[in-house]
Image: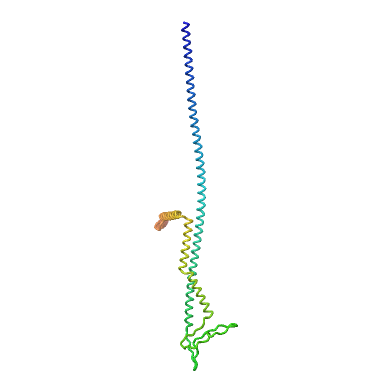
Amino acid sequence: MDRRELTSEAEKTHQNRLSSATEEEEEQDAAYTIVTVLDKVANIVDSVQASQKRIEEKHREMENAIKTIQIDILKLAQAHGNTGFMVNKLLEKTRKVSSTMKEVRARVERQNTSVQKVKAKQEEMLRKNKFRVVIYQEETECPSSLSVIKEMTAGETIEDDFFPPDDLSSDEEYYIEESKATKFKKSGMRRIDDIKKAFSRENIQKTRQNFGKKVNRLQTRIVTPERRERIRQSGERLKQSGVRIKKTISQAAPTKETFKIHKKNKERTGAEGQEGIPEASVHI
């Protein structure tokens, strides 16, 4: 009996040891699994933090890009405002130039009329100055052509060219040297011709073409063709909207027939009221 008890106790102790060993192993396995899980969680947290940092950096870059875009948009708005102001100035200058060109045309036309008048007067004067003189005496024949000699200064001598020639006929014309008035007329005519050449149609057309080319170059530099098309399209849209508004106003506005109908109704009401007044007096 004692042996059996001893063996049973030994078996129990052995089983207790085995159970404790298995429990320790299980605890070790659980701890190992917990450590591995914690390592994985730590790695995941690190990756999440790194991704968050990357996202924050990207957000900062996006904010900086948006700020630069806003600055560029403000600069473009300022540039567009300046270009609009310059375009308005150019339009004012072109209007002034067109007005000055009109004035210059009027002046040129006036000068042309004055030049034509001067030409007509000169032709009349030349016609009046063309006449013949035939002078005879009883025995001696007088020369028919004369020459006017200018006033002599001190030290000058009379040349033989101023004396009348020997061979003169009575049918020749009466010539007089050019005086100061004729020279002044000729110089005036030359100046008028120069002015005519300067203000001729060809020169005016050339100046117009050159000015138009310069204006077109400035317009192409300042306003792009895309913007011109946009402005033209916006103007067409405004015109269409104005036409639509006019149509709606014309449709909504009362016509003459409505006014006539209102007048007829008023006249009828007035006539009915006047008829009702004598009937009331008769009943009284």
| Name of the residue lying farthest toward the bottom | 139
Depth check: give the residue in front, 243 or 35.
35
Above or below — where is 18 with respect to 64?
A: above
Q: Position of residue 120 (x, y in %)?
A: 47, 77
Q: Quadrant of the C terminus?
A: bottom left
Tally the marks: 0
Above or below — where is 118 with respect to 232?
A: below
| Name of the residue lying farthest toward the top | 1
Q: Position of residue 9 (x, y in %)?
A: 48, 10
Q: Position of residue 6 (x, y in %)?
A: 48, 8
Above or below — where is 74 with respect to 130?
A: above
Q: Position of residue 129 (x, y in %)?
A: 49, 82
Depth check: give the residue in front, 227 or 172.
172
Depth check: give the residue in front, 218 or 264.
218
Above or below — where is 45 with respect to 134?
A: above
Q: How is the image coloured?
A: rainbow
